[in-house]
């Protein structure tokens, strides 16, 4: 079945944040000045249990969701994540279960996650320059650790790995070609992301955005590429392949080439609030239904009531003036 929103978009993808905590303090996501030692993360009892997440995922699957991405915060800081994946893997009709991680804890977990039923993985890696990387994650984790996590994922059979790189002018934009060159020919796919005005704390402004066009031009100048058709309707990354046949890259241009028209994503925060847009400010509480004795049918109807009137298209109407609107933090709903 297809549950359509107010603009005819089906509900197909679910992004589940399994924790609001993270072992990184990326300056564009969880800056230390805001997420410092006194920051009040969610107490455990407010976070959905794995059983609750699995129950919700089943209900979403019955409404047409085909793909689930686990995210955070950093999903691998939550204990026994493989237990959640194993539960999700048992849900019929779910074609795809994937995970976005900063990669720092992947060496220890990759095989367990794969064995539990994880199909694919995305690892965030903004640059190969160690000094820049350490200042971006702001906790001193080295590029080597993340590359070792990527190697562990590959050895476990989670390939190709997708690598997410957020590009910020004056921070890491001069290193984008090196990143492409490193993964060219490995089968892995680097996806460059335009720096977005998510949340309220990352000091975003338009000048710090390096546009998809500029990213492509810079890479093409050294490693010639050509555009490729999307794999499926609604794919967020625009695909480019190397002319010499050694692989492809993607560019996610939320700022300059918004893709709201095909947006089929719903997001759940770690405490069970659903958001119909990455840039939303209002979440809808499903946890109190889950814990208040509601049946699956009642929860399903509540989700329908949230999705049907949806008309979100923030990226299409973004201007310099919308950046000040209150928005949920990325670390709560996971990108
Ligand atoms: N901690 C995991 C990680 O970093 O991969 C998962 C959660 S993180 C919020 C998900 C993705 O959002 C990462 O690839 C991250 O680089 C990206 N992201 C965070 N803040 C962003 C921003 N302001 N603009 C663009 N992408 C951002
Ligand atoms: Fe943590 Fe990911 Fe945000 Fe970086 S982008 S602070 S790794 S949640
Ligand atoms: Fe979807 Fe909102 Fe992003 Fe548009 S801005 S693609 S509606 S999440």
Image: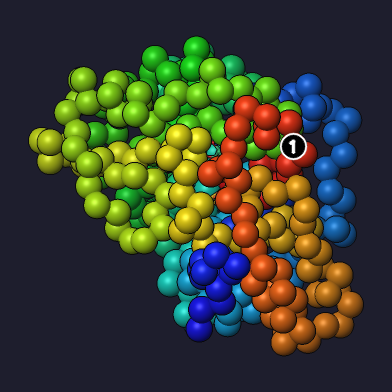
36 in relation to 11, above or below: above
Looking at the image, residue 23 sits to the left or right of residue 90; the answer is right
Left or right: 332 with respect to 43? left
The residue sitting at 66% across, 45% down in the picture is: 279
Is 145 above or below relative to 269? above
State the residue lying farthest toward the left. Answer: 244
| Residue labelled 1 has its Cβ within 8 Å of some atom of ligand 3 | no
Q: Is residue 91 visible?
A: yes
Residue drawn 17% across and 28% down? Answer: 224
In the image, residue 238 sits, relative to residue 82, either above or below, namely: above
Depth check, front residue: 54 or 219: 219
Q: How many marks?
A: 1
The x, y position of residue 265, in whole percent, is 55, 60
> Would residue 107 be visible to someone looking at this image?
no
Q: Which residue is mark 1?
A: 325
Tell me: 215 left or right of 125: left
- What color scheme is it? rainbow
Q: Nearer the viewer, residue 223 or 135?
A: 223
Q: Give how far across and how far down residue 272 sits, in percent.
A: 76, 62
Front in this rendered view, residue 260 or 168: 260
Under circle 1, the secondary element is loop
x, y percentage for residue 298? 77, 84
* Residue at the spot 78% in from the left edge and 22% down from the top edge: 33
Q: Which quarter of the figure has residue 61?
A: bottom right
Give the class, few, some or many, for how many residues have Cα within 10 Å of label 1's Cα (few <14, many ≥20): few
Give the vertical position of 38 relative to 73 (above or below). Answer: above
Return the x and y of residue 210 as percentages of the image width and height: 45, 23
């Amino acid at each position: 079945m297809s549950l359509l929103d107010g603009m005819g978009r089906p509900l197909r993808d679910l992004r589940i944040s399994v924790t609001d905590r993270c072992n990184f303090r990326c300056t564009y996501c969880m800056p230390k000045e805001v997420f410092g030692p006194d920051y009040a993360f969610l107490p455990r009892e407010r976070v959905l249990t794995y059983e609750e997440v699995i129950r919700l995922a089943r209900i979403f699957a019955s409404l047409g969701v085909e793909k689930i991405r686990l995210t955070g915060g950093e999903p691998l800081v939550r204990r026994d994540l493989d237990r959640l994946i194993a539960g999700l893997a048992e849900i019929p009709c779910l074609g795809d279960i994937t995970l976005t991680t900063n990669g720092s804890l992947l060496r220890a977990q990759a095989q367990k996650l794969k064995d539990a039923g994880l199909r694919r993985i995305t690892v965030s890696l903004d640059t190969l320059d160690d000094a820049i990387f350490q200042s971006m994650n702001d906790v001193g984790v080295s590029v080597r650790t993340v590359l070792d996590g990527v190697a562990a994922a590959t050895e476990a059979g989670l390939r190709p790995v997708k690598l997410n790189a957020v590009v910020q002018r004056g921070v890491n934009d001069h290193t984008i070609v090196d990143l492409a060159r490193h993964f060219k020919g490995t089968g892995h796919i680097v996806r460059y992301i335009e720096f977005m005005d998510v949340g309220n704390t990352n000091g975003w402004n338009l000048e710090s955005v390096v546009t998809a066009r500029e990213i492509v031009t810079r890479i093409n100048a050294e490693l010639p590429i050509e555009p490729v058709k999307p794999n499926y309707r609604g794919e967020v990354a625009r695909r480019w392949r190397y002319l010499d046949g050694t692989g492809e890259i993607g560019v996610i241009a939320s700022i300059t080439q918004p893709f709201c028209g095909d947006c089929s994503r719903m997001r759940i925060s770690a405490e069970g609030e659903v958001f119909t847009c990455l840039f939303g400010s209002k979440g809808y509480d499903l946890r109190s239904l889950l814990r208040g004795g509601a049946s699956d049918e009642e929860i399903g109807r509540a989700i329908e009531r949230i999705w049907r009137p949806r008309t979100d298209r923030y990226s299409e109407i973004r201007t310099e003036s919308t950046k000040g609107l209150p928005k949920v933090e990325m670390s709560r709903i996971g990108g």
